[in-house]
């Protein structure tokens, strides 16, 4: 996939997920959404945070690493955004269910670091 089409796909995904999150926050409540709606809300939150974090990482990497291709920077930035946003969404979901403990938080963070380490050393 070309660089510009991938970037536009990420922007569209972030905007759609952001609209879902905003609509659910303003127009509904967890009781009216039900379990499936709350699950969709957390998935939309994950998508929105991943797009925003991926874009921020991409902008930061563009200023620091000029020797890599823009498509490589975008792919790595979006992967890191997905991982960090996923960890944040999981921790927020566990917290909202009152199931989050310190041990669970540490395990999620360690798993996130291990996944990132695996993808960086896979080359």
Image (cartoon, rainbow, N blue to C red):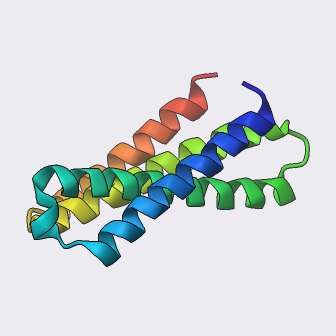
Q: Nearer the viewer, residue 106 or 77?
A: 77
Q: Residue 22: image x %, image y %?
A: 41, 70
Q: Check the picture and name the quadrant holding the C terminus.
A: top right
Q: Is residue 94 left or right of residue 113?
A: left
Q: Residue 97: image x %, image y %?
A: 10, 64
Is any atom of residue 38 visible in this view?
Answer: yes
Which quadrant of the structure image shows residue 62?
bottom right
Which quadrant of the structure image shows residue 109?
bottom left
Q: Nearer the viewer, residue 52 or 60?
A: 52
Q: Is residue 75 left or right of residue 119?
A: right
Q: Residue at x 57, y 23 (%)?
A: 122
Vertical arrangement, residue 119 with respect to residue 33, above or below? above
Is any atom of residue 50 visible in this view?
Answer: no
Q: Nearer the viewer, residue 43 or 26?
A: 26
Q: How many marks?
A: 0
Q: Residue at x 31, y 67 (%)?
A: 24
Q: Residue 64: image x %, image y %?
A: 83, 57
Which residue occupies the extreme bottom position in the image?
Answer: 26
Q: Is residue 52 left or right of residue 89?
A: right
Q: Residue 25: image x %, image y %?
A: 32, 74
Q: Nearer the viewer, residue 36 or 116?
A: 36
Q: Is residue 90 left or right of residue 47?
A: left
């Amino acid at each position: 996939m070309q660089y510009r089409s991938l970037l536009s796909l990420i922007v569209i995904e972030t905007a759609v997920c952001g609209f879902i999150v905003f609509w659910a926050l303003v127009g509904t409540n967890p009781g009216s959404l039900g379990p499936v709606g709350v699950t969709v809300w957390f998935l939309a939150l994950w998508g929105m945070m991943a797009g925003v974090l991926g874009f921020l990482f991409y902008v930061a990497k563009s200023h620091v690493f000029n020797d890599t291709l823009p498509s490589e920077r975008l792919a790595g930035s979006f992967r890191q955004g997905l991982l960090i946003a996923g960890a944040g969404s999981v921790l927020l979901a566990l917290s909202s269910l009152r199931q989050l403990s310190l041990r669970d938080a540490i395990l999620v963070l360690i798993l996130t670091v291990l996944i990132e380490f695996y993808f960086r050393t896979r080359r």
